[in-house]
Image (cartoon, grey):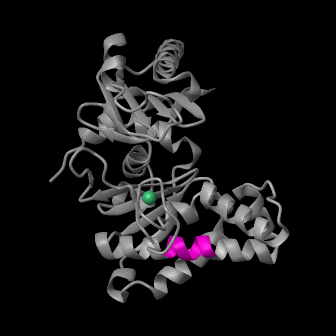
Amino acid sequence: MRDEAAIGVDIGGTKIHFAVVDNNGQIRCQDIVPTRGERGAKAVMDTVASGIARMLEGHGRLAEPPPIAGIGIGSAGQIHYRSGEVAHALDGIPGWIGTPIKRLVEERFPYPVYLDNDVNVIGIAEKQFGKGRTLEHFICLALGTGVGGAIVQSGRLLRGVYGGAGELGHISVDFNGPRCPCGNFGCLELYASGTGIARMARERSSSLEGTVRDIDSRGVMAAWHQGEQWAEEIMDIAIRALSAGISGMIHTFNPQAVFIGGGVASSGDRLMNRVSEHVRKTTASAMWKEVELLPASMGAGSGVIGAAAQGWFYSMPRE
Ligand SMILES: [Zn+2]
């Protein structure tokens, strides 16, 4: 395989990560800037374009720079992956829905441009460079502000009609639960995301003390590790919700692995062990025998590396 590089862009709600990534999955230079989504879609796209231009300059300064194969972008929201437009997003960036990201970048740079959802590109990073390299069927779960998912079946991303498949955060784990912005009740995301864990902590503290304590999911997990009972009760709900969701996913997709990543998962072995214990009890033994629950193997750069890797992923030979 000849040496190549690609520009990766990972557009998140709070920051945009740019990188030059080579086809061994190594970041050769990078830059992170705030998204400042409140400025609206057009301003964010200007930030994206100037970041790509900076990466092209950075690439030019590398010793023996490998030729650039393309530009790959991952974005929060549901992505119409063929047309390269945002199909659906929450309102962090006004005007983001309908933004023709792929076309806008193609107009400014002479390279092929790829666009996908920010968690699908994590699936691509696992498949190209991570522990998913040797697997054909796996699921990636990203437990961050929300809960995102990517499903790889027979080496390909499962897409659905336009690319919306894999919204695993919106599997309901309690039909009597609270209403989710998606319309359903008791979605996994309401319990197992950073936002969900913080919400449960706020609700609990207001019912106990009549005042709402300002606490985020990091605070809850720190208290959990210190053995505080209230945090144990909240994390128990998060863990059981996550386990119910994962068990359903295993029964639906019969995967070889479920990779769990994101800020909430970075609380370590204790979370993984507890989830594993629950899922084992709630999954048919024939399926449990074939599946491993693993921490995401690609780390903090997985979004930008997977975004960059889209061109290589699509050119992989398949049976
Ligand atoms: Zn939902």
The image quadrant where one finds the N terminus is: top left
Which residue is situated farthest in the left direction here?
Answer: 319
Q: Is residue 22 left or right of residue 81?
A: right
- Percent coordinates x, y for residue 40 in the rendering: 51, 23
Q: Does the stretch in magenta take in 238? A: yes
Q: Specify the quarter for ligand 1.
A: bottom left
Name the residue located 51 percent from the left edge and 71 percent from the top edge: 177
The answer to whether residue 25 shows anywhere in this view is: no
Name the residue located 55 percent from the left edge and 82 percent from the top edge: 277
- Percent coordinates x, y for residue 26 in the rendering: 50, 36
| 301 or 165, nearer to the observer | 165
- Percent coordinates x, y for residue 208 in the rendering: 81, 72
Q: Does the stretch in magenta take in 282? A: no
The image quadrant where one finds the C terminus is: bottom left
Name the residue located 50 percent from the left edge and 66 percent from the top edge: 294
Q: Give the image quarter of residue 166.
A: bottom left
Which secondary structure class fits the magenta region best? helix
